[in-house]
Image: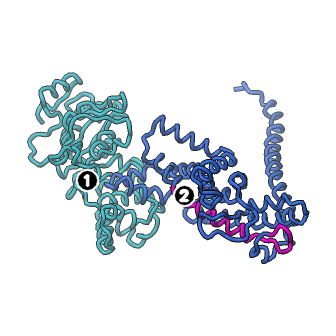
Chain colours: A blue, B cyan
Amino acid sequence: MGLIDKKIIDNKRTSRLFWNNTAMVVFFLCTLVGLLVLAMLIYDTLNDGLRFLRWDFITNFASARNVEVSGFYGAIIGSLWLMLVTAPVAIILSVSTALYLEEYARKGRVTDFIKINISNLAGVPSVVFGLLGLGLFVRAMSMGNSVLAAGLTLALMILPVIAVASQEAIRAVPSSVREASIGMGATKWQTVSRIVLPAAIPGIITGIILALSRAIGETAPLVVIGVPTTLLRTPSSVMDPFQAMPMQIYSWVKMPQHDFSDLAATGIIVLLAILLAMNSVAIFIRNKFSRKY
Amino acid sequence: MTPDTKIETKNIKKQNIVSSTDAGTLSNDNRKNVFSSKNFNLWYGDNHALQDINLDFKENDISAIIGPSGCGKSTFVKSLNRMVELVPIVRTEGQIIYKDRDIFEKSFTKEELRTKVGMVFQKPNPFPKSIYDNVAYGPRVHGIKKKKILDEVVESSLRDAAIWDELKDRLHENAYGLSGGQQQRVCIARALAIEPDVILMDEPTSALDPISTIKVEDLMKELKKNYSIIVVTHNMQQAARVSDTTAFFYEGYVVEHDDTNVIFENPNDKRTEDYVSGRFG
């Protein structure tokens, strides 16, 4: 008793409470910076782009001469074609990889090394993937600047992103339910397909949609591959050339006439709307299927 | 009890094995063995976790395995359905005979073994599915698809697990909404649904409250009419209450295996006596 000077404790209290409140205010202000920037971006985009946002814009091909009739149709359809190739290739490869690494591979240095490198791959700049696609698909495999070449390139780019998200989702399934399944004579595959995957699916799908959202807005690999911006038809097979939304926006921004950069803003609005819709689906799926352990 | 089942020290025990005396064999009982382990050894890496285990378990007995933490009792019971091999560094030697077949034989797949030897785990581990789907999981995995049969299996398994009346109107609710005790009895029903011969229980009541514990113990006594039960327990009173025979494990050895009343009232080994009387462990 008496080792502690009660006066010091009383004096300190004011400053403790001050820092306690300060911390909250600082964190709130930092959050505010992000929100403000986002709000300004959206305001600016809407301000520039809304005047061209008409039905024509969705249904017309792009025109480099007349801004009034220039539209986003080829780019929207082209991007959808692109996703048609990217999504299945990326999903099958990355979810299988994640399942192999988490459920089948022997734990050890080799597995750890592969896991670390997949995470590293997720951080590789997209332009590098573009160069890979150019060398491998466009030239070596002579696919040209087709939907297939670009789709495979983007699939490679988002593969590690989905793989990492899937690994985390699979790891979050408690081992006790795996043991319950195996303990009843179920095979590994039955356990994986009936217990592990259904439990991990919300996390996997969230990862997939976020990765696809990134792929659909990605410009750099498409620039490297040489995706055309003046094309007055939509692809009819995966071997055809195509346009893409981010490429179209990029080419409009580069035009000297000011109206075209406003048109680019209109394109951004459409792209953002599509991204928002995709993210809403991700959130919906996560909430609908999420299970608690 | 014959005196040759008595094991005083590790040295004497090893001599017993050399002279091929079954340390865990109970004489004057001509019922069949469901399991008998012969010179069974197990290592986790360099850690020799089970040493020369010789134990026989009789049909329709409740056989308890007791011992302090880390004595290898859970490891042993998980060896019986080869679940222990989920740990990659595990290595085994010796034999475990399940009804005349060595469980480590190539032709005896783990899947077949685990169909005949069910398991109930320490913590209730229902699947995040409905109660019905939980119980029907085993039969479905083994290829039974007819709804009528599944319905019957679910009902009879839940009845055998003494939980049908509580849950019959809630079959399609998620099993996670149940209390811990109910979940554990659903897990027992789930294990019964594939009609195993043996049920292994690894501390089945350690996560349950006293009332649920009593329910599970009553259930075990009921189940032994049709099943052989091998139960690992931390709780000595539980072993004394429910089991027919008790094996005392200590530091990876079987110190003593005998009728439960002998183990608790007149043990041969000093360490057994100290443990069951609460002097250590």
| Residue B146 screen position, x and y as percent | 31, 73
> Hey, what amino acid is under mark 2?
Val
Is residue B207 positioned above or below B269 on the image?
Answer: below
Occupied quadrant, residue A181: bottom left
Q: Dot 2: within a 10 Å radius of its alpha carbon, few (fewer than 14), some, or many (20 or more) residues?
A: some
Q: Is residue A176 shown left or right of residue A230?
A: left
Residue A52, percent across and down?
84, 72
* SS assignment at label 1: helix
Residue B112: assigned label: 1
Classified by dominant secondary structure, the portion drawn in magenta counts as helix
Query: Given the current orientation, which residue lies at the most extreme bottom position?
Result: A55
For mark 1, name the chain.
Answer: B
Question: Which numbered circle lies on residue B254?
Answer: none
Q: Which range of residues does the magenta coloring cover?
A: A63-92
Residue A239 lies in the magenta-colored region: no
What's the distance in space between the residues labelled 1 and 2, CA to CA?
37 Å
Which quarter of the rendering shows the C terminus of chain B? top left
> Mark 1, residues whose alpha carbon is within 10 Å: few (<14), some, or many (≥20)?
some
Give the residue type at disc 1: Glu
What chain does mark 2 sit on?
A
Residue B244 is situated, as x and y percent measured from the top left of the image, at 21, 46
Q: Quadrant of residue B194?
A: bottom left
Quadrant for the N terminus of chain B in the image: top left
Q: Name the residue under label 2.
A: A89
Q: Which residue is drawn at the image coordinates 15% and 26% (left, top)?
A: B18
**Residue at 46% across / 36% down in the picture?**
A108
Q: In this view, does A62 lie above or below B249?
A: below
Tell me if A138 is positioned left or right of A173 in this view.
Answer: right
Q: Nearer the viewer, residue A52 or A274?
A: A52
